[in-house]
Image: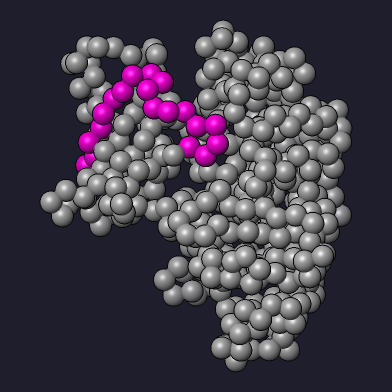
Amino acid sequence: MERYYQPEIETASREQITAWQSERLCKQVRHVWDNVPAYRKKMEEKGLTPDDIKGVEDLHKLPFVTKADLRDNYPYGLLAEPLKNCVRIQSTSGTTGKRVVAFYTQHDIDLWEECCARAITAAGGTDEDVCQVSYGYGLFTGGPGLNGGSHKVGCLTVPTSSGNTERQIMFIRDLNATILCCTPSYAAYLGETMKEMGLSPEEIPLKAGIFGAEAWSEEMRRDIQNTLGIKAYDIYGLTELSGPGVAFECSAQQGMHINEDHFIAEIINPETGEVLPDGEQGELVFTSITKEAFPLLRYRTRDVCVLTHEKCACGRTHVRMAKPRGRTDDMLIIRGVNVFPSQIETVLLNLGYGANYQILVDRVNHTDTLDVHVEMTPEMFTDNMGEITKRQKQIVEGLRSMLGLTAKVTLVAPKSIVRSEGKAVRVIDKRKI
């Protein structure tokens, strides 16, 4: 039987969800107009006032906000509450340029933790569970978000943070942890390590995992589930919006339910900004309608995905987003071809390799090069050059079929690619250096 953390919200009618969104959007637009000069300026440039926004049907009139806007207004330029009302900041794990700093009132934190509690409950979590949070703590949102959500559900929370794999496994076994929260690449590494210790899935007490913060394929999901003996759930979030818990998977695992009482989602054409209908792939845009300190209106996430309002078997009525296919800014254009790392991962996992690989892109004599370094599993490791060459050719063919271009493939020894205890570094693009 499906469990809900807040059933009256999670299974609300479409009419009720739309009513909440319209009321909260209008209030939020007035809030930023009155308190954030940068927003007021953007709206005035489009000839808009708060009176022009009467409900969700007017959302498309508002200007977009981008990561560049966040950097340009660092640190306090988009703050919508007096500093005395703010109790915490979180920050992105860092890209080029200035870091993004997001502010939270206590109310913001309470609502964020409720969103994470919904995700944990959807994964089967109750107050009987032991939830090990192996996301990083500190400025990164993963640890604090799932930690707070676990408390709300009433789980015994084990705040291990990331790293120290030996200790992670000790606590999983000694405390009989039933739910694991971390990045999928770290979950794969934990599973690989436990397998090497001789532990079968039946000997691992975990029953569920909540994995996010990086892209991962369905093949990687199956690999993690088989190694750890769990059901693996996806979770989605952005520091800019709050953190993990913006959307989460239910037992049906047919996309992630967006918490629509807090966030309005749109899919747009990334080139024109035009709003696209259900089922069409485009860039995901979010508007936070309950955030007090750091509300973002029409924030361009750069994530590429699809939305669906089709009925879900779990009973939740909130719109679902497909697992992002990639990001418009992570997407590699190689010799004119759009390439997502997740496509390469799919080919490798289908051929029996692990999720440890590295993509190296360069430009030689004005031509893009694509090199893929792939770790052999211990079972397939060999120094037989004929066998290695045969395997490399097989991967080259698989990638050509998937991507429509030829890559150079190098098979490397097991464990020779550096493991990640946080987000895995999958792509090294030397063209940008």
Q: Check the picture and name the quadrant holding the N terminus.
A: top right
Q: Is residue 221 visible?
A: no
Please say whether residue 177 is one of the residues in the magenta stretch. no
List the single residue furthest toward the bottom.
47
Residue ID at (38%, 43%):
427
- Viewer-proximal residue among 424 and 230: 424
Q: Is residue 20 above or below residue 366?
A: below
Which secondary structure is most common in the magenta stretch? loop
Q: Residue at x 26, y 38 (%)?
A: 371
Answer with the quarter of the image where residue 352 lies.
top left
Residue stretch in magenta: 405-424
Classify 73 as above or below 254: below
Spot occupied by residue 230 in the image (x, y as percentages of width and height): 65, 25
Left or right position of 411 against 321: left
The answer to whether residue 142 of the structure is visible from this angle is yes
Q: Position of residue 177 (x, y in %)?
A: 74, 23
Residue shown at 54% from the left, 14% from the top: 195
Residue 330's spot in the image, x, y percent? 42, 52
Against 331, is 13 above or below? Answer: below
Drawn side of residue 367 relative to residue 215, left or right: left
